[in-house]
Image: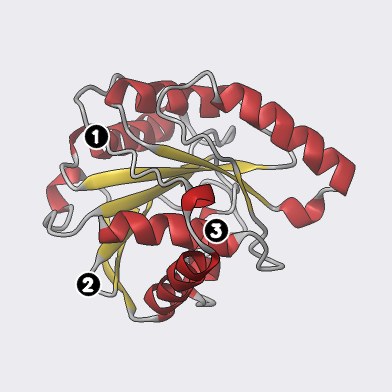
């Protein structure tokens, strides 16, 4: 995809084990209110020249085509169609920006790794994604979505390496966990933990989610809340 450079490290890591139950409940309630509040589409950018002003901290969602990015954004914000869900992999060709409560910008990046995309189209998408990841001053965290049925693939490893180079705090998040049997999911989580641990940018916890069954969303929302409050 291309090299990303620069120091944007902001771990924002909080040891949840050190918090009291009351503090954890308070975090969960603030996260619920934030993600249940206003969330408005700001812009869809096909070139860096039309990126909106970098006035809010940004959290970017990235992953392979059909990894469930749009579904997850809709699920954590409690909307059915905030982010467009395409049944055709590789259809999303722009970076979409959503203003969450005037406190943080959620950014939906085009999917990568779509085998049927032309080389020219793939190069165009990759350039757009890496230009955003490399040069966006307001980017604070990346949520890397991994289809739990497939685990971390070569293209995901490439993105993780780029994020290592950028020192960009990254949450590896498994999606579509409802489509896995418990034993299979346990193995995928273990394998994902091993692979993610090799990357300096990766957050130490793997998030396991299902947009369809609304599972695993609250811990992810709390993590992103704490970043918005930092």
Q: Position of residue 7 (x, y in %)?
A: 20, 27
Of residues 42 and 148, the one drawn nearer to the viewer in this rendering: 148
Kindly identify which residue carries mark 2: 102
Disc 3 or disc 1, which is closer to the eye? 3
- The chosen color scheme is secondary structure
Kindly identify which residue carries mark 1: 131
Q: Quadrant of the N terminus?
A: top left
Residue at left offset 67%, top offset 59%: 210
Q: Secondary structure at mark 1?
A: helix
Q: Position of residue 202 (x, y in %)?
A: 46, 31
Residue 186 is labelled as none
Place residue 189 in its image quadrant. Answer: top right
**Label 2 Cα crowd, 10 Å radius (few <14 / some 14-19 / many 20+):** some
Q: In whole angstroms, how far apart are the C-alphas of marks 3 and 2?
A: 21 Å
Q: Position of residue 200 (x, y in %)?
A: 42, 22
Residue 219 is labelled as 3
């Amino acid at each position: 995809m291309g090299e990303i450079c620069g120091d944007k490290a902001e771990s924002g890591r909080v040891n949840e084990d050190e918090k009291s139950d009351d503090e954890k409940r308070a975090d969960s309630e603030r996260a619920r209110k934030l993600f249940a509040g206003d969330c408005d589409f700001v812009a869809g950018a096909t070139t860096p020249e039309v990126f909106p002003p970098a006035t809010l901290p940004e959290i970017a969602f990235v992953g392979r085509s059909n990894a469930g990015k749009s579904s997850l954004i809709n699920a954590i914000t409690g909307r059915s169609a905030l982010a467009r869900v395409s049944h055709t992999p590789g259809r999303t060709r722009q970076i979409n920006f959503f203003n969450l409560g005037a406190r943080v910008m959620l950014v939906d990046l085009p999917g990568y790794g779509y085998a049927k995309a032309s080389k020219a189209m793939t190069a165009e998408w990759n350039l757009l994604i890496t230009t955003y990841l490399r040069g966006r001053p307001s980017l604070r965290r990346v949520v890397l979505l991994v289809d739990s049925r497939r685990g971390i693939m070569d293209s995901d490893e490439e993105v993780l390496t780029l994020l290592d180079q950028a020192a960009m705090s990254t949450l590896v998040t498994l999606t579509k966990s409802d489509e896995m049997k418990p034993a299979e999911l346990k193995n995928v989580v273990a394998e994902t933990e091993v692979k993610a641990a090799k990357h300096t940018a990766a957050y130490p916890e793997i998030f396991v989610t299902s947009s369809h069954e609304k599972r695993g969303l609250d811990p992810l929302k709390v993590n992103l809340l704490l970043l918005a409050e930092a």
